[in-house]
Image (tube, rainbow, N blue to C red):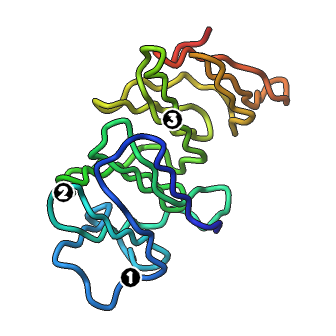
């Protein structure tokens, strides 16, 4: 597993520290994501979170995969009270103002996390979650869009040009990577 990432690209109303281990004495508020999981301690991502208002809490995020291709870390979200914690490719979106409120993404694993901020152009800020076959976009109000199938097994060479996301996806029929371009506002191919 690679070292955890911290990406605070979007403005956020919280601070967070990735801990090397679970503390011997747990804080008063401790949340386990997902709520029901076997052996959450083994390899879990432990994050001490301090919301802008309210009491700090420990977020224990169950590990997905130990593969270095599966990211681990924390990312700011388009909504400033929300935090994204990824543990071995399992992504948890946590409302830091109300940590009981969270979403575990259906992509297992998430293979890459990409910020897209176009506020200076009047666009909508998004965080993009890249899976094996498609991409899921999350905005201020939750899930914004999901792309169609872009690959049979692996999306590579992502780049953003204005409001277009370009990349490549492996095609089973031709046994090669084929380019794609998505409108970042809608997730539709262009």
Residue located 85% across and 30% down the image: 175
Tag 1 and tag 2, C-beta contact below 8 Å: no
Question: Sequence-wise, which precedes: disc 3 or disc 1?
Answer: 1
Q: Percent position (x, y) of residue 159?
A: 69, 28
Q: Percent position (x, y) of residue 56?
A: 22, 68
Q: Badge 2 local density, few (<14 within 10 Å), some, or many (20+)?
A: some
131 over 169 or under it: above or below: below
Q: Is residue 171 left or right of residue 190?
A: right
Could you tell me which secondary element the residue under label 2 belongs to?
A: loop
Q: Percent position (x, y) of residue 103?
A: 31, 47
Residue 143: quarter of image: top left
Could you tell me which secondary element the residue under label 3 belongs to?
A: strand
Question: Sequence-wise, which precedes: disc 2 or disc 3?
Answer: 2
Q: Badge 3 local density, few (<14 within 10 Å), some, or many (20+)?
A: many
Residue 77 appears anywhere in the view? yes
Residue placed under numbered mark 3 in the picture: 128
Which numbered disc covers residue 100?
A: 2
From the image, which quarter does the C terminus lie in? top right
Q: Badge 1 local density, few (<14 within 10 Å), some, or many (20+)?
A: some
Which residue in the rendered view is the most extreme toward the right?
A: 175
Residue 105: quarter of image: top left
Residue placed under numbered mark 1 in the picture: 22
Residue 186 appears anywhere in the view? no
Residue located 65% across and 63% down the image: 67
Marks 1 and 2, how far apart at CA? 19 Å
Q: Is residue 157 left or right of residue 3?
A: right
């Amino acid at each position: 597993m690679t070292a955890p990432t911290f990406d605070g690209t979007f403005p956020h109303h919280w601070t967070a520290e990735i801990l090397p281990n679970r503390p011997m004495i747990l804080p008063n508020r401790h949340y386990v994501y997902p709520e029901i999981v076997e052996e959450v301690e083994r390899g879990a991502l432990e994050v001490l979170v301090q919301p802008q208002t309210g009491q700090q809490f420990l977020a224990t995020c169950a590990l997905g995969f130990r593969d270095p291709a599966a990211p681990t870390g924390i990312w700011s979200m388009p909504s400033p009270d929300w935090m994204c914690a990824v543990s071995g490719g399992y992504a948890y979106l946590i409302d830091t103002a109300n940590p009981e409120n969270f979403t575990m993404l259906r992509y297992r694993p998430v293979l890459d996390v990409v910020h897209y901020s176009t506020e200076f152009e009047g666009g909508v800020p998004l965080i993009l979650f890249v899976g094996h076959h498609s991409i899921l976009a999350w905005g201020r109000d939750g899930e914004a869009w999901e792309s169609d199938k872009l690959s049979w097994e692996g999306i590579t060479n992502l780049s953003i040009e204005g409001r277009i996301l370009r990349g490549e996806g492996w095609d089973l029929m031709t046994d090669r990577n084929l380019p794609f371009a998505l409108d970042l506002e809608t997730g539709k191919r262009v």
